[in-house]
Image (cartoon, rainbow, N blue to C red):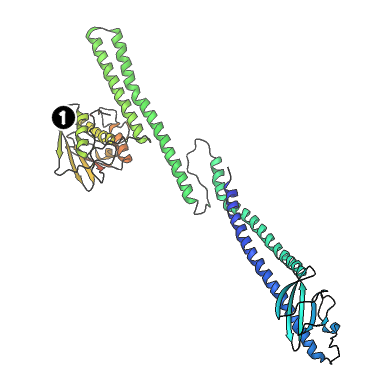
Amino acid sequence: MMSLRVRLSLTLGGAFVLIWLLAAAWMLCDLRMQMMDSLDQRLAASARMVAGLMDQMQMREQQDGSVDAERLLVSSPMACQVSSLRGEVLARSHNTPDGALTADESGYRDQLINGERWRSFTLTHSDVRITTADRQEERDVLSHSVLLAASVPVVVALLGSLALLWVVIGRGLAPLHRMRDALKRRSADSVEPLDVPGLPNELQPLLKTQNQLFQRIAQTLERERRLTGDAAHELRSPLTAIKTHLQVAQMTGGEVRDKALAHAEEGADRMHHTLEQLLLLARVEGSLSFDDGVQCDAEKVARLAIHDAVSGNEQRIELIIAPEVSAAPVQMPAVLAIAALRNLLDNALRHTAVNTQVELTLLTTSGQAHFHVRDYGPGIPEPDLDKLTQRFWRNGKSPGAGLGLAIVQAIVQRCACSLRFDSQPDGLRVELHMPLRSTTSTSPDIGFNGL
């Protein structure tokens, strides 16, 4: 797997090389054009210089009209030719090609003489034409030399930029290396927050997310340890009681034996119920999905929870439904909504006399379903209200495993609900609020099987 440093270096280095090559090509092309233009201007300047020399010399007319070429002072290796308007060559420099330079028209032109390419400039002055010329091969050699001399700094600067880029990327990734080293130094079971000082702003969210992950892992491990310890402590008593009653049943007979077996069966039922509650709590607090596609409105949630809580004796719970209750389904898995309300009803029934009803009021407002459960028990002291949702916590000698309200709290936290307790002298009031879906859809029938 390619490292981040190599990947960034290749990406940025490729961009650097591309930009530098384009810039260098543009610069060198412009340099070549300017150099050729300068050489052309040198030809024109040389021709004008010869014309000036001819004027200064004030040459005397001779029969052949010849001009002393040695006195024209045209620098080598430039060729120079002086011809009449009729095309007769009057004078030429020693390095002029054997073939005459074409001088029919004024200005610049490219010529091929004896297999060699020449660049010439012709100037018409008085009654003569002055032509200066350079070999194209010599121009190309000079151009290549200049371009090579200009390319060397570009290549050196490019290589230096790539080396500097490699170093800068390495220094820029140093905070990541420090985070890596800090993680490598940690033990496998360490869940303490990671502390790496001096991180840049771009890495602060990564560090924060990493520490949040450690915090969730620590909470999960603590929850599992607490669940294991509480379960072992809570199941020890029914197991001991079952074993004791079975031993009594083995040593006795008749009515005493039947009574011992009945107590053993009660202990087994209690242990079975506790295990079911523990498994449900573990599922709710874990990442297992409860969404089976079933939707259920608030009224159906109330009726199914009542059915599961009273096991057929529905007269013990008085259901009060406000007018115009919304038919929109609750915005959570129906099985969790029923379980949360059922556990609240179980808790209310457990603390209410047998001949007294528990009240369940349902109303819907502002996209939420509001369930109000009221019992007529002894109530809860104000300091103990915060302990109601703790695992295995019981008020005095209250029956049950102490997991029902802990399950409700876990469902509330998972499904964005809200839960509130209000203890009064004549009993406990509990408010459970569930969000409703924004659109109404037909809900499939839900069976009456308890969780």
Compared to 64, does 267 lie above or below?
Answer: above
Compared to 17, does 28 lie above or below?
Answer: below
Residue beneath the point at 31% across and 26% down: 274
In the rendered image, residue 23, in percent from the top left (x then y), is placed at 62, 64
Q: Which residue is mark 1?
A: 314
Q: Residue furthest front?
A: 86
How many numbered tags mark residues here?
1
Residue beneath the point at 57% across and 48% down: 4
Q: Is residue 59 left or right of residue 406?
A: right
In the rendered image, residue 165, in percent from the top left (x then y), is placed at 62, 56
Quadrant of the frame with the N terminus: top right
What's under tag 1, amino acid-wise?
Glu
In the rendered image, residue 28, in percent from the top left (x then y), is placed at 67, 66
Residue 372 sits in quarter: top left
Quadrant of the frame with the C terminus: top left
Residue beneath the point at 73% across and 68% down: 143
From the viewer's side, name the closer residue of 230 and 409. 409
Give the class, few, some or many, for how many residues have Cα within 10 Å of label 1's Cα (few <14, many ≥20).
some
Q: Is residue 271 left or right of residue 430?
A: right
From the viewer's side, name the closer residue of 257 and 425. 257
Residue 119 sits in quarter: bottom right
Compared to 204, does 322 lie above or below?
Answer: above
Compared to 167, does 35 lie above or below?
Answer: below
In the rendered image, residue 106, in percent from the top left (x then y), is placed at 71, 81
Helix, strand or loop for disc 1: helix
Q: Is residue 338 left or right of residue 229?
A: left
